[in-house]
Amino acid sequence: MIIVSALLAACTAPLNVTTNQSQPIEIRIDPQFDSSDCRYLGEVTGSEGHWYSYLFYTNDTMMKGAMNDLKNNAARVNADTVYMIAPQDFTTSFSLLGIAYRCK
C-alpha cells in the first residue's frame, strides 16, 4: 500500500522542475505585452508527457511541467521574459511555444 501511495504521489508532480536560474523568468500571454524595449533571443519550447506516461499525469501536472521546461530553455538563452504563443494540448503530452526576450 505504501508503494502504491508513493507512486501515485509521484504522478502529481511534473518531471520537469525549474532551476534556480529559470525560476524568476516571466511568462507573458497578454496581448498588451510590448517587446519594443526587449532584445529578441529566439523561439523556445517546453513540453511534458510521453506516450507511455500520460495516463499517470493530470493535465495540470503536464502543463506545469511544460511551463517549467519552457522556463529552463529560456534560461539557457539568458532570457528573462517569454511571450507564450500557443499551448498545444495533445492526448499524450502538453507542449508550449514561446519567444524569448531579454527585457531588464
Image (tube, rainbow, N blue to C red):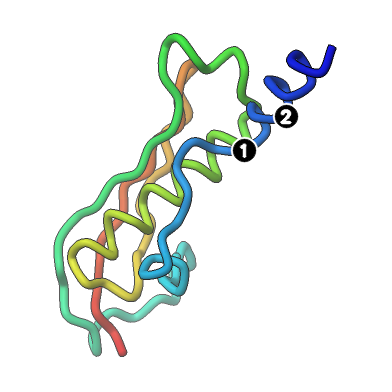
Task: Tell me: residue 85, above or below residue 87.
Answer: below
Mark 1 residue element: loop
- Residue type for callout 1: Ala
Looking at the image, which residue is at 41% across and 19% down? 50
Task: Tell me: residue 19, above or below residue 57.
Answer: below
Q: Distance from label 1 to label 2 (Cα)? A: 7 Å
Observer-nearest of 102 and 9: 9
Task: Tell me: residue 54, above or below residue 64.
Answer: above
Residue 41 rendering spot, x and y as whole percentages? 15, 68
Q: Quadrant of the C terminus?
A: bottom left
- Residue type for callout 2: Ala
Q: Quadrant of the N terminus?
A: top right
Residue 35 position by quadrant: bottom left
Residue 97 rendering spot, x and y as whole percentages? 31, 47
Residue 7 position by quadrant: top right
Query: Horizontally, is 7 left or right of 48 in the view?
Result: right
Q: Residue furthest right?
A: 1
Name the residue beneath numbered marker 2.
9
Query: Horizontally, is 20 left or right of 104 in the view?
Result: right
Looking at the image, which residue is at 23% across and 83% down? 38
| Mark 1 in CB contact with mark 2 (< 8 angstroms) | yes
Mark 2 residue element: helix
Count how many numbered circles sit on residues in the image. Answer: 2
Looking at the image, which residue is at 24% across and 89% down? 37
Query: Horizontally, is 18 left or right of 99 in the view?
Result: right
Name the residue beneath numbered marker 1.
13
Task: Tell me: residue 102, above or below residue 56.
Answer: below
Looking at the image, which residue is at 26% across and 60% down? 99
